[in-house]
Image: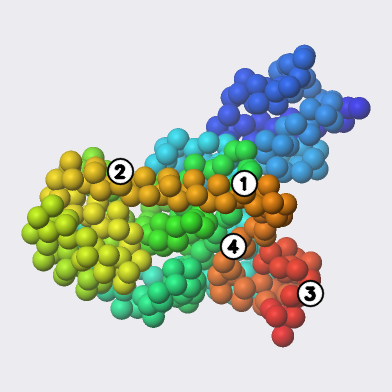
């Protein structure tokens, strides 16, 4: 069966995702004895089975390709039209996530305007010429929440504080069996959207990513990136990335930086100042490896000692994952049901209040509320009172 498609819409997606025709054909021809041709792809009438394969890549829904309206290539539409290079070579999974939240950002902005809500940026734009420590100290007084020892609760508290200043923070969750996992930790979209990858096994990493992307928000520099802690000591980082890393460190460490400054050298003679590092980590939610990386950046630990410590942390993490895998396999053999519920993203209070107002104003319906907030209908009364 063939149907008429709007070829310009397919070409728009290729441009948006920076995919060549050849790359797309190779992706959608997997498993076929007779590969799809370029002529098949751009015919006015396209086989529905081909269109379904195309949509497995882009997840737009079949109606998207049939819409006669041609999409406009503009900088307002996507960060991929505003910026050519990113902190990582984005895979298709990452591009889909970024596109999903870009479209949601535009949709939410329209909903807010119709509801006569102001969710525009309220904090000033800073410059990287300004001292990151000074800016962090200043904003920490405004935005740092009451410290919570539970890392997830502290992350929630940060997201809540940011919401009070019209900064929207979203999480995306990837299931363990997803084929094309996004190779990113987070990103900032102008004017006020930060998106984080849920780090279920390491909320400390997610907290640092949030504050790093908050740094990008402050200097109004969009970025999509994967944060590698060990690279943070590199003197080859761009001025922007160095500023955001420094800002994140000083915002989170607060007065505990004095303990770091009091360390002369971390080596075997003082057990690498491990007790001090553990104390700081427990009271700031900066990971121990992030703190050792800071010592490396300040030349307070040798490269060899740092590598030894990092290798030890990596081995501990590997053993932990191995143990968890063995536990799952043993439970499977015992007939214990595997899996469990997928972690739910944390909803920003700013998102919730915007959606509530839009509902009360008649802009959206109950279905839209449930879909946007990722809640079941029987939980609706908890949000609409």
- Residue 329 is tagged as 1
Contact between marks 2 and 3 (CB within 8 A): the answer is no
Residue 73 drawn above or below residue 367: above
- Label 2: how many residues lie within 10 Å, few (<14), some (14-19) or many (20+)? few
Residue 78 drawn above or below residue 273: above
Q: Earlier in the sequence, mark 1 or mark 4?
A: 1
- Residue 345 is tagged as 4
Horizontally, is 280 left or right of 223 in the view? left
> Looking at the picture, how far across and down is residue 123, in whole percent?
39, 70
Residue 184 drawn above or below residue 246: above
Query: How many numbered discs sit on the rendered protein?
Result: 4
Residues 60 and 318: in front is 318
Mark whose residue sits in front, 1 or 3? 1
| Residue carrying label 2 | 311
> Looking at the picture, how far across and down is residue 372, in whole percent?
68, 64
Residues 42 and 254: in front is 254
């Amino acid at each position: 069966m063939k149907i008429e498609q709007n070829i310009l819409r397919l070409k728009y997606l290729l441009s948006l995702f920076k995919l060549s025709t050849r790359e797309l054909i190779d992706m959608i021809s997997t498993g076929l004895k007779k590969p799809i041709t370029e002529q098949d792809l751009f015919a006015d009438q396209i086989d529905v089975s081909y269109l379904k394969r195309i949509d497995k890549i882009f997840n737009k829904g079949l109606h998207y390709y049939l819409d006669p309206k041609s999409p406009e290539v503009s900088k307002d539409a996507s960060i991929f039209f505003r910026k050519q290079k990113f902190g990582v070579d984005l895979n298709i999974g990452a591009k889909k996530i970024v596109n999903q939240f870009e479209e949601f950002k535009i949709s939410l902005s329209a909903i807010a305007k119709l509801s006569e809500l102001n969710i525009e940026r309220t904090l000033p734009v800073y410059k990287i010429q300004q001292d990151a420590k000074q800016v962090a100290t200043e904003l920490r007084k405004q935005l740092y929440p009451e410290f919570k020892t539970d890392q997830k609760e502290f992350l929630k508290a940060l997201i809540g504080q940011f919401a009070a200043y019209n900064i929207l923070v979203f999480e995306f969750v990837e299931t363990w069996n997803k084929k094309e996992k996004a190779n990113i930790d987070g990103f900032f979209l102008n004017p006020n959207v930060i998106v984080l990858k849920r780090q279920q096994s390491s909320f400390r990493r997610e907290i640092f990513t949030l504050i790093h992307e908050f740094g990008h928000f402050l200097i109004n520099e969009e970025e999509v990136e994967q944060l590698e802690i060990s690279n943070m000591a590199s003197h080859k980082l761009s001025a922007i990335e160095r500023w955001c890393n420094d800002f994140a460190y000083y915002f989170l460490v607060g007065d505990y930086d004095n303990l770091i400054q009091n360390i002369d050298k971390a080596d075997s003679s003082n057990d690498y100042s491990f007790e001090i590092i553990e104390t700081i980590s427990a009271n700031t939610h900066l990971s121990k490896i992030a703190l050792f990386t800071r010592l490396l950046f300040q030349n307070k630990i040798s490269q060899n000692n740092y590598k030894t410590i990092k290798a030890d942390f990596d081995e501990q993490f590997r053993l932990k994952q191995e143990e968890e895998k063995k536990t799952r396999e043993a439970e499977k053999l015992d007939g214990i049901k595997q899996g469990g519920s997928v972690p739910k993203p944390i909803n920003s209070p700013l998102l919730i209040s915007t959606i509530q107002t839009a509902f009360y104003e008649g802009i959206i319906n109950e279905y839209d509320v449930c879909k946007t907030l990722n809640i079941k209908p029987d939980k609706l009364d908890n949000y609409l009172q």
